[in-house]
Structures are given as structure tokens and as C-alpha cells.
Amino acid sequence: VHKWRVTADNVYGISGWCGGLWDNMKSFQGDCPISDAWCGGENGLLEWKFTTPSTCGPGAVEAAWWEATKNEFGAIVC
């Protein structure tokens, strides 16, 4: 099991970014079924966290972040 947690500062429109992150994780649902999912935040601090089986590699999470944000809030390395 992998427990993922990504945070970013100075994020505007957090709910919209969260929607994009979840949408992009759907591309990996075969290897990365998600449980214990949460995304949100306030005062510009986004927090994205979820659990996947060990079949879900870091590349899937990094790719979902890139596709949703184009690294506007920085790149992630899982």
C-alpha cells in the first residue's frame, strides 16, 4: 500500500485544481485504484492525499500532477 500526500503553496482556485488531479488519476485506475481520497485546502495551501495499492508507481502520481497543473506550483518527485 502507498499513502500519497502532495502539498503546494500559493494555489488559487483549489477546488478546480483538485478536480483536475482526480480526473488525471483516472488514466491510471487499473494500477492505481484510489481509497481514502481527499483534496482541498485554504489560504492558498493545497493538500492532495490518497491511498493506492503498491501496484501504483510514483510515475502515475507525478504524471497526474503534471497533466493537471503543468507544474504551475512546482514539480513533484514521489
Image (cartoon, rainbow, N blue to C red):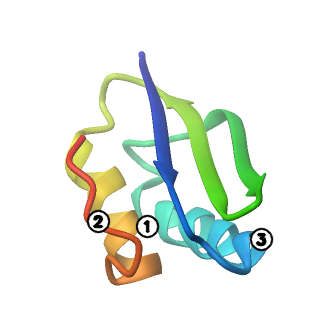
Q: Name the one closer to the observer, 61 or 53.
A: 61
Relative image position of residue 46 (x, y in whole percent): 62, 56
Q: Name the one closer to the observer, 23 or 40.
A: 40
Instruction: Say if 1 sits above or below 47 in the image.
Output: above
Relative image position of residue 68 (x, y in whole percent): 47, 78
Residue farthest to the top, as pictured: 1
Element at label 1? helix
Residue drawn at point x = 40 percent, y = 57 percent: 28
Q: Amino acid at mark 1?
A: Ser
Q: Quadrant of the C terminus?
A: top left
Q: Mark 2 vs mark 3: which is more N-terminal? A: 3
For residue 69, which quarter of the picture? bottom left
Question: Dot 2 corresponds to which residue?
Answer: 63
Q: Amino acid at mark 3?
A: Ser
Instruction: Say if 34 sits above or below 69 in the image.
Output: above
Q: Quick one: label 2, few (<14), some, or many (20+) residues within 10 Å? A: some
Q: Are marks 1 and 2 in contact (CB under 8 Å)?
A: yes
Q: Nearer the viewer, mark 2 or mark 3?
A: 3
- Tell me if 66 is positioned left or right of 20 in this view: left
Q: Are marks 3 and 1 in contact (CB under 8 Å)?
A: no
Question: Dot 3 corresponds to which residue?
Answer: 15
How far apart, in angstroms, are the residues tagged by discs 2 and 3? 19 Å
Q: Which mark is residue 27?
A: 1
Element at label 3? helix
Relative image position of residue 35 (x, y in whole percent): 66, 32
Relative image position of residue 12 (x, y in whole percent): 67, 79
Q: Amino acid at mark 2?
A: Ala
Q: Name the one closer to the observer, 54 or 10.
A: 10
